[in-house]
Each structure stands twice: as C-alpha cells, then as structure tokens.
Image: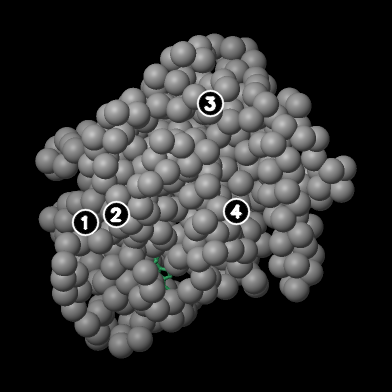
C-alpha cells in the first residue's frame, strides 16, 4: 500500500501545513517483544494498553503511511457503543456475554473522552449523543427488536424522542422518528489518532511511519519484513483493518466496501440560524446509511455507506475519494438540511470499511503463524470499539489466553461466498438494487419485487432485518 492519495479534511487539519516529516521509514533490523502493524486506532490503543499493563514490554509499531491516514483519520467521527448491535451480539455470544461486551463498549466511549481530557484535546470530543433516526416511513421502527431485547435484558441505553425533540436535536424536520443514545460522542478522529501517536511515543513505543510491511515470516520468532529491513518479535499484532482482507484466511470473513464523506464550508452562523446543534451524531436506518453531524467549527460532515466495492479485496485509489457519488451525497445532505442549498462543499474523501460477515470484529491467531494476532471486521463502527479492541488485543498478547472472548469473536465468520469475479459483479448488482429500493422508499413508493429480492442477498446485512423489512442497526460507516 502506498501513501493514501487524498487526505481527509480531518487529517489535513490535524497535521497542519506542511505535513510533518515522518522520516524515511524503518531501516535496519530490530528486535521487540511485540510488533504492531498498523497505526490506526486499533494499533495505537493496543500499544498504549500493552505499555500500561507492562511498561517494560518492548513494542515497535510500523505504519505504511502516517498514523491516522487509514480509516481512523477519515471516518465520520461517531464514537458509538455496541448497544445497536445487541441482537447480533446475543446471537453470537448469548445474552450474558453480549451485555457484558456492550457495557465494555460503552465504557470505551467514556475512556476516549477521558483520554481527550487528560491530553488537553477535550475540544476533539463532544458527548452529545447519537440519534438513530428514520428518514422515510420504511425505516420507522427499525430499532423495535433491539429495544424489545434490551427490555428483556434490563438494559436501557436509549430514550425515545418525540417528533419535536427530534427536530430540535437534529435541526431537521426530515426525521420522522428516532431514538437517542446519550453515551455516544462526536470526535475529530484524526486529532484523536495523532494525539494517541504522541501518547504512545511518550510511553516508550518505537513508532515508524512510512514503513510498509511486505511480508510476515513465521518461525521460532516472527519476522516482519519491511522494505528496508525487518523487525523480529515474539508476537505480532496485525491491526491493518480492511487491508488485512488480502490475507485469504482473514479475507474469507470480510467484504471491503468504501464509505464516502463530504464536508461543507464552515458556516456557524447559518447552522445557528437553521437551529442545527453541533456534536449530535445522526444516522438513519437505510442500508446505504446516511450519517452526519455538525462540527464545532460549523460544518456539516455528511457520510454515506456502500460506496466502491473491492474487487478481490484490493483497495485501490478509488477508495480515497467519493468521485461521482459526491453529487448524490450532497443531495441527501440537502434533503436533510434544505436551507444550506447554497453552502459550498469544502472537501470530500472516502475510505475502506472492513465489513465482517458477522457484523462484528473478530480476533484470531493466524493458523500458519499463531504468534500473529489479527483483528478486523469493525464493519464501519470502530471508533469507539477500537478502544475496547486495544484492551482485548493487549490481553491476548500478554496472557496468551482467550481474553474472556466468546468463541464467535475468536474465529473468522464464514458464509459461502462465490469466487471472483462473480462476487464482485454480484455485489454490484445487490448494491444497485439496495440503492433503487431505498430511493423508492424515499419517494414513498413500494420498491420493485426484484430489487427487494436482490437487496435481501446483501451478505453483510441480511441478518439484521428489522420489522417492516427495514435494515436494523446500521451505524456510521457501514
Ligand atoms: C469513510 C469512513 C467513515 C467511517 N465512519 C465511522 C464512524 O463515524 N464511526 C465509527 O465508529 N467508525 C467509522 N468508520 C470505521 C472506523 O474508522 C474504523 O473501524 C476504525 O478507524 C478502524 O481503525 P483501525 O486502526 O482498525 O484501522 P485503520 O485506521 O484503517 O488503520 C490501519 C492502518 O494500517 C495501515 N496499513 C495497512 N497495510 C499496512 C502494511 N502492509 N504495513 C503497515 N501498515 C499498514 C494503514 O495505513 C492504516 O493506517 C468509518 C470508516 C470510514 C472509512
């Protein structure tokens, strides 16, 4: 993987102009207790947690580009919990483990807030909650099954909103119905990633940016081979997100799809005039989810899931920018906030989502190289959960056990998938059908039967069907 072609607005803001000199990358040979591959949230939280548990652990982290240049510096900035995934967690792990994991994921969001406060970047974290909204009649009630399950398990993370409350909270009367989850935050993700990098370095971790791993050689000690040298380590953590899909064993459980984002110019007075509050995260209930929030500086950042599909798990330059999708995303933005019709779009960017076939991340030791622990599959919902993943990975490295994880999260999810090019072509067909179905729903028309049938074949979504055929928990990047 080369340097990512386009930087997100978040990353440009966090890096400043010109970008800091990241040096020439790793050169030579080094030994460490643990080598972490990937400098996104997962790798950085893992490094910090390893050092917190045992400061003497020698940790080297290598990142192909700059830390935060992957999904961690490009996302929608929603730090969410796993309560919306409860139904799914229960089906994989049983009710007790599911609730425990969801509670840990909620704690992860609070811990990110504590980190930002400790490190003096509190303005990069605003906990004004997440609104799970319906923006057309077909989406109304998408949360009902989750709510019923929560009730049975005596957990109450959501509050139902009246239509007036919804309008006041979101600044848009396009939301027909919705739930509020107060423990969810809007973050400036690239600032969080770059601050994590500083914290990790201060903790004594050697971080080498612009250091792309070429191969991992398994032996009595594992060799991580880079362009100009190698790191030999007792254990290796592979935290490369969607890029891990190229490893067949991991890729078997993943579908890689882009999510696309646009950001308006900063117009704080226009947002104030329109009654749009900052820092409230909103997603709607469509499969090609719309997710948006107003930032503290007065921009609307509006994202949409279901962009470019990876052929054979390859992440190409088309994963860096929405391209022709930008106009469609802008029209969704204007449908939500029509009064902003004349506000220019200042930036657009994209990134790959590591959809897992189970909808949740998995933590596995590679069969051929058990000293390598890989984590992938955040499925567009990794900002908050990657904090928890860091704890889990550090525990797996330190104790070598199961970190108390249910088996379902310790194996690659499997489902029969056709080979390429059928998978790619089929995926495009399904995605187009979902788009047509959701357009019909927006227009108040009944989707065509063929589109409904094709849409139901979505391998990353069909277990989530809520009542009335609406997709269930679809959170930011998904
Ligand atoms: C457009 C978009 C919107 C999203 N919105 C949200 C959201 O609002 N909320 C949410 O919770 N989640 C969201 N997500 C998902 C979230 O960003 C990710 O789940 C999370 O950041 C994953 O972090 P990570 O560290 O696992 O991956 P990454 O941040 O992608 O880090 C992986 C790193 O590995 C590096 N790498 C890859 N290959 C190599 C190699 N060979 N050698 C060395 N390094 C390598 C990459 O350069 C990258 O920096 C979104 C994702 C995208 C793309």
* Point 46% across, 37% down: residue: 338
Answer above or below: position of 76 versus 221. above
Q: Secondary structure at mark 1?
A: helix
Neighbourhood count class around disc 4 (C-alpha, 10 Å): few under 14, some 14–19, many 20 upward = many
Q: Secondary structure at mark 2?
A: helix
Q: Is residue 53 visible?
A: no
Q: Which residue is disc 4 drawn over?
A: 306
Neighbourhood count class around disc 3 (C-alpha, 10 Å): few under 14, some 14–19, many 20 upward = many
Numbered marks: total = 4
Quadrant in which the N terminus is drawn: bottom left
Which mark is drawn over residue 14? 1
* Point 70% across, 55% down: residue: 431
* The quarter of the picture showing ligand 1: bottom left
Which of these two is toward me, 229 or 478? 478
Q: Which residue is disc 3 drawn over?
A: 175
Q: Which residue is disc 2 drawn over?
A: 10
Distance, label 2 to label 3, CA atoms, is 27 Å
């Amino acid at each position: 993987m080369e340097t990512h072609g386009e930087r997100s607005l978040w990353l440009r803001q966090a890096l400043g102009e010109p970008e800091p000199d990241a040096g020439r990358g790793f050169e030579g040979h080094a030994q460490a207790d643990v080598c972490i591959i990937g400098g996104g949230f997962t790798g950085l939280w893992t490094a910090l947690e390893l050092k917190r548990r045992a400061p003497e652990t020698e940790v080297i982290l290598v990142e192909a580009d700059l830390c935060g240049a992957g999904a961690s510096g490009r996302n929608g900035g929603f730090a969410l919990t796993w309560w919306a995934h409860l139904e799914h967690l229960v089906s994989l792990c049983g009710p007790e483990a599911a609730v425990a994991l969801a509670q840990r994921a909620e704690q992860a969001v609070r811990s990110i807030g504590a980190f930002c406060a400790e490190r003096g970047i509190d303005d990069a974290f605003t906990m004004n909650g997440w609104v799970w909204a319906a923006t057309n009649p077909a989406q109304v009630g998408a949360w009902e099954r989750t709510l019923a399950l929560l009730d049975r398990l005596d957990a109450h993370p959501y509050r139902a909103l009246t239509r007036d409350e919804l309008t006041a909270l979101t600044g848009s009367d396009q939301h027909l119905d919705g739930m509020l989850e107060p423990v969810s935050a809007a973050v400036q993700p690239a600032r969080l990633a770059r601050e994590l990098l500083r914290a990790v370095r201060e903790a004594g971790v050697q971080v080498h940016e612009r250091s792309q791993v070429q191969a991992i050689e398994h032996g009595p000690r594992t060799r991580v081979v880079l362009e100009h040298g190698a790191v030999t380590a007792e254990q290796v953590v592979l935290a490369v997100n969607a890029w891990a899909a190229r490893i067949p064993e991991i890729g078997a459980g993943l579908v890689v799809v882009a999510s696309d984002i646009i950001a308006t110019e900063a117009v704080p007075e226009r947002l104030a005039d329109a009654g749009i509050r900052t820092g409230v995260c909103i997603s709607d209930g469509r499969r090609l989810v719309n997710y948006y929030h107003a930032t503290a500086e007065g921009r609307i950042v509006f994202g949409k899931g279901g962009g470019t599909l990876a052929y054979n798990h390859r992440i190409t330059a088309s994963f860096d920018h929405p391209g022709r999708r930008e106009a469609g995303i802008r029209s969704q933005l204007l449908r939500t906030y029509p009064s902003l019709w004349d506000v220019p779009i200042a930036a657009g960017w994209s990134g790959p989502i590591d959809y897992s076939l189970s909808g949740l991340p998995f933590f596995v030791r590679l069969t051929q190289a058990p000293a390598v622990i890989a984590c992938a599959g955040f499925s567009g919902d990794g900002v908050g959960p990657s904090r928890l993943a860091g704890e889990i990975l550090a525990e797996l490295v330190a104790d070598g056990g199961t970190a108390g994880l249910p088996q379902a999260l310790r194996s690659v999810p499997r489902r029969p998938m056709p080979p390429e090019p059928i998978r790619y072509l089929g995926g495009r067909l399904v995605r187009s059908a979902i788009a047509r179905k959701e357009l019909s729903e927006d227009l108040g028309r009944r989707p065509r039967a063929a589109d409904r049938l094709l849409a139901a074949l979505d391998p990353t979504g069909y277990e989530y069907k809520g009542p009335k055929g609406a997709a269930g928990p679809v959170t930011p990047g998904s």
